[in-house]
Image (cartoon, rainbow, N blue to C red):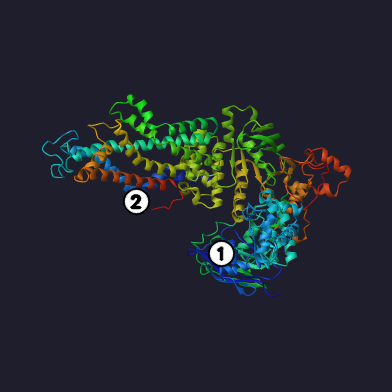
Amino acid sequence: MTLSDEELAEELTDGTAYRAPSRLRVVTGRFFRSTQGRIGFAVLALMFLLAFAGPLVNRWSYTDKDLTAFMRPPSADHWFGTLQTGSDVFAVTLRGMQKSLIVGLLAALVSTALAAVVGAFAGYFRGWTERSLTWLTDLLLVLPAFLILAIISPLFGSGQWVVFVIMLALFLWMVTSKIVRGMAISVKEREFVQAARYMGVPPVRIIFRHVIPNLSSLLIVDATLNVSAAILTETSLSYFGFGIQPPDVSFGTLIADGSRTAVYAPWTFWFVAGLLVVTVLAVNLMGDALRDAFDPSAKRSR
Amino acid sequence: MSPVLEVSDLTVSFGGVPAVRGVSYSVRPGEVLGIVGESGSGKSVASAAIMGLLPPGARVTGSVRLHGRELIGASQRQLAAFRGKSISMVFQDPLSALTPVYRVGDQIAEAVRAHQRVSKENAMVKAVELLDLVGIPRPSERALAFPHEFSGGMRQRVVIAMAIANDPDVIICDEPTTALDVTIQAQVLEVLKRAQAKTGAAIIMITHDLGVVAGFADRVLVMYAGRAVEVGAVDDIYYRMRMPYTAGLLGSIPRVDRGRQPLVPIEGHPPSPAALPPGCPFAPRCPMRVEACDDREPPLFEVGAGHGAACIRWEEVRPDGLARQAAAGDTSRLRVRGERTVLAVRGLVKDYPLLRGAVFKRRVGTVHAVAGVSFDIRQGETLGLVGESGSGKTTTLTQILELVPPQRGRVVVLGHDTARLSRGERTEIRRDMQVVFQDPLASLDPRMTVHDILAEPLRTHGRPAGRRIRELLALVGLESSHAARYPQDFSGGQRQRIGIARALALEPRLLVLDEPVSALDVSIQAGVINLLDSLKDRLGLSYLFVAHDLAVVRHIADRVAVMYLGRIAEIGQVEAVYDAPAHPYTQALLSAIPLPDPVRERSRERILLEGDLPSPANPPSGCRFRTRCPKFRAELTDEERSLCVTVEPEVRPLNGATDQGAACHYAEKRGVV
């Protein structure tokens, strides 16, 4: 192709630093331009800072027991009060937050990613891929979660939180994946997917570049809901002796224990519950902002 | 005669945004008023306001008088008494205008019984009469059929039958033929004329097609940005227009009777109703703009008897289209075809199985979508593939684009036979053959920025993006700052330019264009056609241009192939085929296209085809066109006919023609445009 000389000259004069306005850059820009996104991101960052930097300024660790103070309300010595065992509530809450933030966020991301990939592959390829993936999804839906847990539990001891995250994610993805499959089928019929095929783009790349981004509204909503779902599921798993075991704590175990004493010793419950609410709220704000940033038809907030 | 319907100073606004801004007109009994305008000009909203069919959020002011009785502000009850009786309406989409679960006879009878006190039996008899009037064969039988058993053209006839059921005084037709093929459009317009002659009703014909109005209307009202910008007798509008917009509109239409010459697009795009420019709304796009244009919006000046134009410089507006017509005569070129063949299709066949049953699918028939099609495209050449819906042109296109071995026949793309392609070769061909789709919004991923859209083909084939994207944007007339935006931020014409830029990213040699301009407004369409034309010359491209609009093809193509029911009826050089078509189908097709030229349109002899396209699952024996062929019906002897019935004609070169062939046993050249 030959461009005329004038056009070439023009290209050369102002073509020094050309920043490619790719999707990643535009979406990031739009995310941080929205108030919701900024607030959500700031709050979540603060929570992480609190969870990981907080223990450094507190003189109690989560394993310490103050034998001089059982069930005491908040004071200068114990900022959030103490538990029946003499543990410092501030210390255990931060310890629980460390676990729950990582487990909750990761489990939500993994389960949504799993749902997106399985659903999109099943919807895009149809045929045998679809049949086997749908069969797998249905199998996991009907198999009782505890059965799988019973089989797998010997494989992970305490402290292997990566396995725990994957376990949690495995229970959350199936229904979303079925929805994604249906939507992927309709996206596949759209002309821009045809256009990409005729351009020679490989099918797997079409799925990741065209199909999944066009389902992003659903996926982001799903991921935000999954964060709280993962934190709460973790609690029930802990009851059955999986996941977080004492003396280690998580939001789940703390809320379960604290709810029993909440009436006469509110500090054992309300600080944990409050932080959980703030975390989930921040995640929701971020999810909303991210969804709007991805969606070109959303109103611009500048 | 006193006017039957008088509209004065009608305004409609939705939530403070004006859609119609002071439209006035009147129609007399038996008169046909054409309202033309591009999408968004407010033409459909204005007519819906007359019927009282606007959604609750609309604010309507002004006056609409039917026989002197005011309709604006009338109660729903009063309106219901008028609707369907004094005013009736024919909608664009005949499928959604009919209830799918009732028989058509019952639906027409319902329209009759809504306003007349007759028994069910009598209403049904009347319904059958009406179906007969609108030209539906075997009306008493067909009255018992459901809407889905009718073809598009037949459905529109049913809708017309319902519209005239109560002898209305005014029939409002909102784009009645836009969804139909040209030969069916000609039939439906004929039916409308007959219906009008029978009822003596006034017709308000709303359309974007200046050709349809030319032969049909007595007076024309041109709308732009919610206002009437010119109104007058049909000849005044077409030959003595006094508004630059009308002149621009007429100059931008590709015409089937004129050879290749650059169209004159109207710059820019229509203003958004929420942000109208100060002064004349057309001023930003107007070639005759002066400073005074921005002062205030011009009223409709009286420029002649019954002729008004909203332009302060109306005295200087000249119809430049006529001058161009005179100059066009000497452009007939005798092109020598290129040496290298970029695409060759030989005897391509594609069948689809017709399956029945939900659980156990069994084959109940075969749809012969493409039944032996052959053509080739040489380097630097444009082949127009035209045909009505169901002719198999899209199937042919996908067969070529898929690059898989065809069911039968051969497809050779850029020297590679698709039956023997390795993976690497296929990727290589994909780089050299690109496609532009019909609907620019659907073919661009809404979640990608323009930069990513244009970068996709480059990245796929391992080329650096960056600078190339700005080159591409400049090439199609967009700015490099547009790269950060999403497709939905652009107008239709700009989106199609993005689609073209994406197709050009890899410097292809062959571009497949699937109806690239049919979703665009006329004034925008001309710009895209010109762009395609200039790109071809600059970049040495070859085009396969699929379209149903024969006028567009005449403007852009070097050769044309006319398809009918999965086969090529006629193929050859554009000038030869358009000036002297030899196949009866091509003749009928060309004669069915309305010209934006009232005098010629009135004097033209139409070759009307009867009936609809036969089902491709069950094509006629011998010549596929014989069931609708006017020649077969009227001119041939029985002896000659037997050849048509038994032997399927192949495309044969015509005697004495350099490059023209027709698939007809009795091909005979004949000028019809």
The residue indicated by pointer 2 is A35
Residue A21 visible within the image:
no
Query: A234 above or below B535?
Result: above
Between A141 and B661, the one nearer to me in the picture = A141
Where is residue B61 shown, x and y percent of the image?
Answer: 53, 70
Describe the element under mark 2 as helix, strand or loop: helix
In this picture, is B57 found above or below A206?
A: below
Amino acid on which the number 1 mark rests in the picture: Gly
Nearest to the observer: residue A284 or residue B600: A284
- Measured as percent of width and height from the top left, residue B484 is found at 45, 47
Q: Where's residue A60, x and y in %?
A: 16, 37
Q: Which residue is mark 1?
A: B226
Amino acid type at image mark 2: Thr
Question: As rendered, which of B361 and B244 lies closer to the eye?
Answer: B361
* Mark identifier at residue B290: none
Q: Position of residue B81 (x, y in %)?
A: 62, 68
- Tell which of B579 and B363 is nearer to you: B363
Q: Given the image, what chain letter belongs to the residue carrying mark 1?
A: B
